[in-house]
Image (spheres, rainbow, N blue to C red):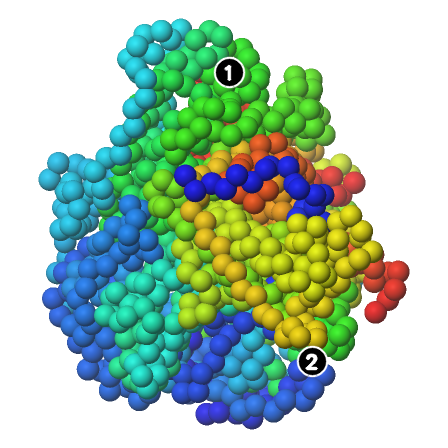
Amino acid sequence: MKQPIEMYINGEARSVTVDPYRSLLDTLRGEVGLTGTKKGCDVGDCGACTVIVDGRPLNACLMLAVEAGGCRVETVEGLQASPDQLHVLQDAFMRHGAAQCGFCTPGILMMAKSLLENNANPSDDEIRFGLSGNICRCTGYTKIFDAIRSAARQLQETPA
Amino acid sequence: MNKPHVPVEARRAFTIVGQSVRRNDVLEKVTGEGLYTADINRPGLLFGKIKRSNVAHAKISRIDTSKALALLGVKAVLTHEDVPRFLHYGSPHPRSASCTRDQYILDDKVRFWGEGIAAVAATSEEIADEALDLIEVDYEELPGVFDIDSAQAPGAPLIHEVGPGSNLVLPPVRVERGDVENGFAEADFVLEGVFEGGRPVPAYMEPNVCMADWDGSNKLTFWTSTQTAFMVRGSLAEVLGLPLNKVRVLVDHMGGGFGAKQDLFQHEYLCALLARQTRRPVRMEFTRAETFIAGRSRHPCRILLKQGFRKDGTICARDMKIIYESGAYGSHSPGVTTVGTNAATSLYRCENVRLEGCAVYTNTPIAGAFRGYGVVQAYYALDIQMDEAAERLGMDPAELKLKNAVREGDIAPSGHPIVGRGLEACLKHGITAFDWIAKRTETPRNDPAQPAIRRGWGVGCEMHGSSAYPGIREQGNATVKMNEDGSVTLLTGAAGLGTGAHTALAQIVAEELGVTFESVSVVHGDTDVVPWDIGAFASHTTYLVGSAAKIAAGKLRAAVLARAAEKLQTPTEALDMVAGRIFIADAPDRGLTVADAMGPSKGIPADHLIETGSYTPTKSYSFAAHFVEVAVDIETGLVDVRHVMPVHDVGRVIHPIAAAGQIEGGIQQGIGHTLTEDYLIDRTNGRSLNAGLVDYKMPLSMDMPKIETVILEAAPDPGGPWGAKGVGEDPIIAIGPAIANAIHDAIGARFHHYPITPEDILCALAAQKKE
Amino acid sequence: MRRFEYHEPASLAEASELLLCLGEGAFVFAGGTDLLVEIRERLRRVHHIVNIKRIPGLDELMISAEGGIWFGALVTAGRIERSSEIARLYPNLHDAVRNLGSIQVRNRATVVGNICRASPSADTIPPLVADSAEIEIFGPGGTRRTALAEFFTGPGRTTLSRGEIATGIRVPPPAEGSGRVYLKHGRRKAMELATVGVAVSLNRSRGTCSDISIALGAVGPTVLRAPKAEAMLRGAVLSPEMISAAANQAMAECTPISNVRSSADYRRAMVGVLTRRAVTRALEATA
């Protein structure tokens, strides 16, 4: 039976009615209409669907939408403060060539946001460890590491 | 050939080419607004799924869909009894020598475990999924062949009725130059080896997906994640019996392809047919497991390589036989076999060459096009054997490779002369920058801090062509429009796999035209709108479509200057245009903006100019040498690639960061191929064993080495814009032998296969102990 | 995905009753990181999901040097990973959770869930078995406790009967002068299922190894102890030669199989290497 839930997605209250077997990922992409979060494997192996729920990054494919009732959900669409103001990470990803096909990018951006929130000045090893659940098949990760290092520096100089 | 005589040196200093401008497609990628095929919705959308066989080789004796059709929410079910029986190519170049006509949309015969045998459309994914279980199938099983040997054994069951027989996909490809027998007779020693390659898969992040919708005029609109939109259009039209203008293929962003997304994967035809039958839009999206089972892999292979050497390191004869395993269908096997076999004529110079290449059907998943297209396999063998020769000669392997490196004037695999000395430049640069000699000769293999670790250093080389010439006579096209406000629109059919191709094309247009990069926008991905394109593959987009764009932009520049000349009342020849400003070359203060030139002025209405460019190239070759450090744990057999210095010659670099990104991503895939990635098939029954991202092991963030990318502009090719050549495929080729050679340097064991597993390392070490 | 019914009981008694009534197709759902995958990959026919997340009291995590650890069924691997006390007192458990899946998975996956899945390669089981942890189980007959080492009956099988729910894990306090290590072997540095996992917990008093337990993952139908190898080291002053001999003994005590991840022979060889390394490091940790 479908159940009504209310989530706070990128700061906005959203009411949807969902089947109990629907994942948060399918619900975000389908009922909610936020398709920035990607489905790369649907079994928690690739990290493309990484969103932040109540402050913690997780795989949206491995959470049921019914469980997200009352939760704060952050997706890539909520990263920018306004249409003209990108998040420091988004800007760094563009400058450093960290996005190639871009399919893993939303998940990696959310993971990087969480990483920098918990550790403002991560070492190279900490960046690598922080991204170990996000598969990128295009870049060899080097440009992603560059972008995150650069964003961390920039955030430290001018906190968001 | 149709090579324009573009002087390699620029007519002026570059302002945009060579700059890492912000990619014109990347803002959408970082905001989540970029639309990938699965992101597009339509009212009334149905969800399609494919029922897959659980046997590898069989006749379908009965298939009953009644229970599936009875499930609430199921709108249509298709089996081989319901679809047109049309023998098609499955691959996108039906007029070329690259592919094979051996597939049906659905057949009453199954040729590999996991082949599609029926399709369902339903109102939800869950219902479609449940319906698959309700389709009842009886099989009459046939004996299967699951490797090269059993497929080639006398009396082996035949997988196809078409083709040359004996489970061959195509007649053997034979290449002969010089006198091989005489060459071997002159040799001081001969090296001979058998090399084997596993089954890596591209594992692009975006699973295959398409959506079909028919309108009231019986026109099909088809969204799909493809590198070859026009080829999809052509194949759908051919199979469905439609004129080309009744099929519109759309692709905006796509999540990687690495070559494999040139094929059609069976679901495209089924999706279109389900949509036609239900009169509703249908989307079909592969699961991750389906991207393995029903996707395309690199061809597993076996190579017999024999070379004769003189004491001075000259190669006097080369004899190679390469057998590619095609899997259940031909797909790109003809192209892969031809390109891979011919590749062995070159890289390291040899006048006496005899090569034979075959591709063999087996009852396993389909091998197709994948970055490195047959060449990865051939050069893995060739480069490792060069290392062995160096060892035998007591020479440094980099020195031996340098001595034999292909160079200016040598005949390339494509049959025309090599331009420049790119490979030598890469090797020379790397030897110095990597501090190669000191590392190899002065650094202890043991690491006192880590007693189980042995360090080693290796080098591997490659060359790869931009464009599929001579296999396919390609044509690149571009339309460039100057709008009346001075903004520019480039229309291109080239796909945006994620490489930054559209950015490079816009840079080329802006540079040639003399406007800013920001003033050029790109329209792509709609076969009803953009000029025809053969597809994004063969490392050719910048080379081929870039040249076409440059031609169109050059014509447009002339037209714009002619208009400005009228307004400025000066001869056109007196004018120059830089960064969107037109001025008299001898009096730079006198001029006007492009917008003013295009806009209205008294007596002259605003104008809009359109020019097109078409280009038919031959081929250029790019080169690379990869220098690698590995650390081998001699107790566990684990190999850690610690440091890679890829040195690439790309002729003229258009966008340095994008080019480096290609190289670094290729290294990631190549490390995987060489050490951890292998899509395993049970050789007794054809079942997939690791169709998922946990057991198919790609290197991830913690596994990647330090990479110091070097891009040289050593050997510009006159066939590409300002000498630019391709870079997409090159990096995946050189890294493999470099790693294998470095492992040998670390532990003294030679490996002639990939992936080299920890267990292989321990076995080799144990064998050394015995000796 | 397949369709299923969803239940959110408010108490253990209600959850237990639901599981009894709904029968074979009903499964306890906590983190869901295994169950949802099994549903999608058609490995398990699930008609009902009984989500225990609303049941109060199951999310407790208590840790102290005197009392050891208690954590409830809803405590995620991520919470264990982030506990600096656990990292200090139980580095073996810390390393095991740190190597389980990804950060994202660990923010959902529960350790009790990882245990109840009863995979021979589960990372959290070897260190907990080596540390003599107990599992607490609620059921129709009341609450029972059992040694974790006795909880498993085979791959994917435990002593849980229908209507029973594992509610938490208790780990005894670490002894003075003890060292504990978990080593995992995989092809990659993250996102791996263990090819082999070895946990060693040992106590040292007056220069001898007064007690030791060695637990081996992924080399038998359940996580195994290596009692003969332990016996060789217990009560002895440990030398590298002795440790090597015990590691060889551990190789003889395991019963690995060959599968897509590794051959049995390689797994056995890695038991030797990892046991030697783990005992050596555990000994160093006592210093």
Which numbered tag is attached to residue A10? 2
Query: Disc 1 residue type?
Result: Ala
The amino acid on which the numbered mark 2 sits, given as a three-letter code, is: Asn
Q: How many marks?
A: 2
Up the image or down, B175 lies above or below B361; here it is above
Q: Position of residue B282 (x, y in %)?
A: 37, 78
Between the residue at mark 2 and the residue at mark 1, the CA separation in whole angstroms equals: 61 Å
The picture places residue B2, in percent across and down from the top left corner, at 43, 42
Q: Is residue B299 left or right of residue B508?
A: left
Is residue C11 rendered to the left or right of residue A82? left
Instruction: Give residue C273's position: percent from left, percent from top.
Output: 56, 36
The reply to the same-chain question for discs 2 and 1 is no
B329 on left or right of B598: left
Q: Is residue B165 visible?
A: yes
Q: Is residue B422 left or right of residue B537?
A: right
Image quadrant assignment for residue B500: bottom right
Residue plotted at (27% across, 40% down):
B359
Front in this rendered view, residue B759 or A14: A14
